[in-house]
């Protein structure tokens, strides 16, 4: 049986010996990248409409805390407090909205919101137009109602620690 084992083991030993000449990276070092034409190509660009219609794709211009009266900026509770807008959320007094879609149009952004208020959920559209530290909200689904807001922190002295 020993001779038969040697006959089987010999081809495996030769195969392993042939592999031993190549350098193998240790487990603590990554393998070098494979260079192919596909790997060298730049990543594909997203379609132009993707950046304009996805939540979080809006500009930083409307992100922040906004109030109808600048004195409300220091309030954190009640109806007379600022609304907070991120690229994905629109939070106000007794309502919370997700920004489902946002699209840049001349002079501003048109957004579709899904809002929850007083146990009800509704979709609503709003147009956001920023000029300096002023935000103009136009609500097409509310007969074109307009709300003018001021950025909290605009024209105020820095907060003292």
Image (cartoon, helix red, strand yellow):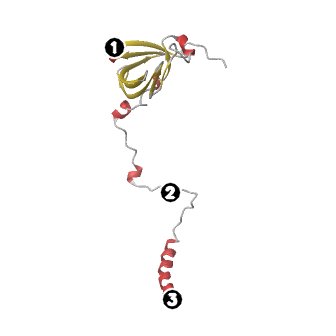
Compared across the picture, whether 5 is left or right of 100 comes to: right
Residue 3 vertical position relative to residue 110 in the rendered view, above or below:
below
* Residue found at x 34% / y 13%: 144
- Left or right, 18 with respect to 42, comes to right
Q: Tell me which numbered mark, 2 or 3, is placed earlier along the sequence.
A: 3
Residue at the image point whose x is 45% and y is 56% from the top = 34
Q: Residue at x 40, y 18 (%)?
A: 129
- Marks 1 and 3, how far apart at CA: 94 Å
Decide: few, some or many residues near mark 3? Use Cα within 10 Å; few <14, some 14-19, many ≥20: few
Q: Of the residues tagged 2 and 3, which is closer to the observer?
A: 3
Q: Which residue is mark 2?
A: 32
User: For mark 1, does the 10 Å Cα neighbourhood hold few (<14), some (14 to 19), or many (20 or more) residues?
Assistant: few
Q: Which disc number belongs to residue 25? A: none
Where residue 56 sits in the image (x, y, percent)?
43, 31
Q: Name the mark on residue 1.
A: 3
Quadrant (top left, top right, bottom left, bottom right) of the C terminus: top right
For the residue labelled by badge 3, is the local secondary structure a helix, a strand or a loop?
loop
Judging by the rendered image, the residue that carries numbered circle 1 is 144
Callout 2–callout 3 Cβ contact below 8 Å: no
Mark 2 packing: few (<14 Cα in 10 Å), some, or many (20+)? few
Mark 1 or 2, nearer chain start: 2
At which x and y percent is residue 157? 60, 14
Q: Real-space Cα distance between discs 2 and 3?
A: 45 Å
Secondary element at tag 1: loop
54 relative position to 8: left or right: left
Instruction: For the residues labelled 1 and 3, say whether their Cβ atoms are less than 8 Å apart.
Output: no
Q: Secondary structure at mark 2?
A: loop
């Amino acid at each position: 049986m020993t001779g038969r084992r040697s006959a089987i083991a010999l081809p495996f030993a030769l195969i392993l010996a042939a592999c031993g000449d190549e350098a193998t990276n240790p487990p603590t070092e990554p393998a070098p990248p494979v260079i192919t034409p596909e790997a060298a190509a730049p990543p594909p660009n997203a379609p132009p409409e993707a950046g304009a219609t996805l939540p979080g794709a809006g500009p930083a211009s409307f992100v922040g805390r906004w109030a109808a009266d600048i004195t409300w900026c220091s309030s954190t509770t009640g109806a007379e407090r600022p609304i907070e807008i991120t690229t994905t959320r629109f939070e106000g007094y007794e309502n919370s909205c997700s920004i489902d879609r946002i699209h840049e149009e001349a002079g501003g952004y048109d957004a579709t919101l899904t809002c929850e208020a007083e146990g009800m959920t509704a979709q609503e559209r709003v147009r956001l137009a920023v000029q300096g530290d002023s935000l103009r909200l136009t609500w097409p689904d509310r007969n074109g109602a307009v709300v003018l807001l001021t950025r909290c922190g605009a024209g105020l002295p820095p907060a003292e620690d």
